[in-house]
């Protein structure tokens, strides 16, 4: 039977284990998301498009007024509660609950990772209107406007699933391969802003599922391999120096991704990363273990729980493209 002394030792040990579990649990979202503290229920971005370049000054000046744009997403509360029957805890000869309780902390630490995955893959709760990005269209789209206020500026694509997209008679992206990677990388280098000049996008990270690990590592990390045939390259016989390794794109295996064959190429070198984690309230841990707590007195249940508030949100759509079959 649990005594007051042994129960105090149990609670102290569990508290320490929960703290340690939260500290050592690894996360991925910081690699491709910017964490933005929220000072209210809503996270709102404000920005203007790329201003026009300087022009030859003949005659009078031509005035340009910036067109401010906004994007808003609301924080959602999340919680997890674990209850343990006090009689089962009394009879726990194998210390099972010592091992279970730290999972409350692990799940809290993984909370942003899982929500960012759900945003990227259109999963609950980030469905419907949450899928709309900064320009009002779905973030993954084949026809993002380059200039919201000038349709003549054209569009750009950041969704190359479904086998890729043919742009200017070139098949770009699609299922992961050296050619799909090369064409998508080069396409992103040429993305333009409202001033019709290159935005300076430089892909630096390729996020993928565990099922693509071997192929991605081969293409991005091997010193040499037999080159594919595309463009003017096709006459090389045997293994050659792996030019892709010099691109400096790092692979990031995300075991949480559900769509095994989809991959994401992104630029994480800018002040804002391709995605945003809005943090209204970091996880708070609470335990209800006093004899006069209703759950303990009425239902002989000890409970441990946490709660937090946050928002998975998009950043600039041109910073990341997804691709796949």
Image (tube, rainbow, N blue to C red):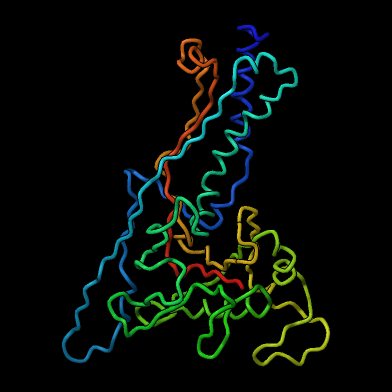
* In the image, farthest residue toward the right: 238
Q: Quadrant of residue 148?
A: bottom left
Residue at point 60%, 12% (across, down) = 8
- Frontmost residue, 303 versus 298: 298
At 51% across and 67% down in the image, what residue appears? 320
Judging depth in this view, the residue of 319 and 202 nearest the camera is 319
The quadrant of the picture occupied by the C terminus is: bottom right
**Residue 21 at x, y percent in the picture:** 63, 34
Q: Residue 286: percent from the left, percent from the top? A: 49, 25
The N terminus appears in which quarter of the rendering?
Answer: top right
Please indicate whether residue 310 sits to the left or right of residue 46 in the image.
right
- In percent of width and height, residue 307 lies at 46, 34
In this rendering, the answer to whether 95 lies above or below 171 is above
The single residue placed furthest to the front in the displayed view is: 299
Q: Quadrant of residue 22?
A: top right
Residue positioned 70% across, 25% down in the render: 96
Front residue of 183 and 123:
123
Report how many numbered discs are placed on residues in the image. Answer: 0
Horizontal relation, residue 143 to residue 45: left or right? right
Vertical relation: 194 (above or below) 211:
below
């Amino acid at each position: 039977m649990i005594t007051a002394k042994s129960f105090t030792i149990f609670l102290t040990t569990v508290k320490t284990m929960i703290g340690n579990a939260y500290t050592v649990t690894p996360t991925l979202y910081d690699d491709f998301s910017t964490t933005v503290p929220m000072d209210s229920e809503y996270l709102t971005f404000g920005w203007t498009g790329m201003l026009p370049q300087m022009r030859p000054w003949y005659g009078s000046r031509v005035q340009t007024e910036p067109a401010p744009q906004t994007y808003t997403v609301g924080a959602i509360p999340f919680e997890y509660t674990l209850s343990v029957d006090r009689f089962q805890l009394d009879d726990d000869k194998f210390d099972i609950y010592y091992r279970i309780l730290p999972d409350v902390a692990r799940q809290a630490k993984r909370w942003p990772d899982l929500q960012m995955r759900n945003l990227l893959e259109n999963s609950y709760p980030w469905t419907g209107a949450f899928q709309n990005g900064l320009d009002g269209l779905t973030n993954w789209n084949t026809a993002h406007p380059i200039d919201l206020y000038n349709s003549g500026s054209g569009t750009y694509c950041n969704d190359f699933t479904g086998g890729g997209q043919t742009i200017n008679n070139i098949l770009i992206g699609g299922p992961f391969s050296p050619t799909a990677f090369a064409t998508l990388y080069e396409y992103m280098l040429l993305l333009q802003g409202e001033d019709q000049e290159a935005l300076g996008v430089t892909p630096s990270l390729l996020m993928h599922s565990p099922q693509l690990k071997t192929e991605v590592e081969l293409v991005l990390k091997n010193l040499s391999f037999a080159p594919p045939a595309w463009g003017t390259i096709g006459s090389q016989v045997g293994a050659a120096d792996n030019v892709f390794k010099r691109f400096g794109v790092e692979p990031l295996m995300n075991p949480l991704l559900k769509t095994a064959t989809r991959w994401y190429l992104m630029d994480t070198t800018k002040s804002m990363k391709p995605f945003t984690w809005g943090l209204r309230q970091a996880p708070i841990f609470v335990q209800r273990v006093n004899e006069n707590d209703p759950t303990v007195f009425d239902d002989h249940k000890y409970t441990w729980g946490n709660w937090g508030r946050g928002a998975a949100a998009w950043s600039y759509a041109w910073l990341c493209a997804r691709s796949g079959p």
